[in-house]
Amino acid sequence: MPTRILLEGRPSSGKTTVVRRLTALLRTRRAVGFTTEEIRHGGTRSGFALETLKGGQRAVLAHVDFPGPPRVGRYGVDLGVMERVALPPLRSALARAAPGDVVLIDELGRMELACTAFQDTVRCLFESDIDIVATVHAHSDPFTDAPQAAP
């Protein structure tokens, strides 16, 4: 039975730090996925960047200056970043799954879940035999609250 670990927490509670530390500890396993990180200017959060675990591909996912749609709070979200940066390693894990592989997703949050293709890929991952560790926002959401999203 595959491992499923969901780390729930409020913003700045250390979820991303745990995923990064876990990535470093799992050197003997093929770990794929992404992390997100706040972008700050002058002590104020202005957006979020997304970075892949392998290769370090990085792009701005959401920013106060992005027009959207969609918008999550005061941030416009660039769904193309999910398609170009976040989804390829996740889809690769599904296509080439091998024993010992682990997918790390930071996070299953409103910005990321605004991408329908991401939701579909996450559903497929949870239906697979791949081990998954994901961070989850602390707010209620139909996707993360649904039994099929987190069996």
Image (cartoon, rainbow, N blue to C red):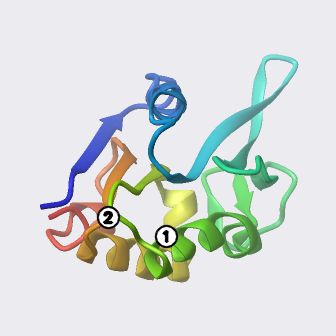
Secondary structure at badge 2 equals loop
Q: Is residue 117 left or right of residue 6?
A: right
Image coordinates for residue 49, horizontal then vertical, percent: 74, 46
Classify mark 1: residues with Cα within 10 Å, few (<14), some (14-19) or many (20+): many
- As displayed, is residue 81 above or below residue 96? above
Image coordinates for residue 134, horizontal then vertical, percent: 38, 49
Q: Residue 93 carries which label?
A: 1
Which of the two residues, 7 or 126, is positioned nearer the viewer here? 126
The reply to whether callout 2 and callout 1 are in contact (CB within 8 Å) is: yes
Classify mark 2: residues with Cα within 10 Å, few (<14), some (14-19) or many (20+): many
Query: What's the residue at 19%, 74% (across, down)?
Result: 148
Q: What's the residue type where badge 1 is placed?
A: Ala
Query: What's the residue at 49%, 31% (across, down)?
Result: 11
In which image quadrant can residue 132 be found?
Answer: bottom left
Which quadrant: the C terminus? bottom left
Q: Which mark is residue 139?
A: none
Secondary structure at badge 1 equals helix
- As displayed, is residue 103 above or below residue 128? above
Q: What's the residue type where badge 2 is placed?
A: Ile
Q: What number of labels is visible?
A: 2
Image coordinates for residue 21, horizontal then vertical, percent: 50, 25
| Residue at numbered disc 2 | 130
Q: In this view, does 149 lie to the left or right of 20?
A: left
In which image quadrant can residue 114 be found?
Answer: bottom right
Residue furthest top in the image: 43
Which of the two residues, 107 or 19, is positioned nearer the viewer here? 19
For marks 2 and 1, give the CA distance: 8 Å
Image coordinates for residue 147, horizontal then vertical, percent: 14, 69
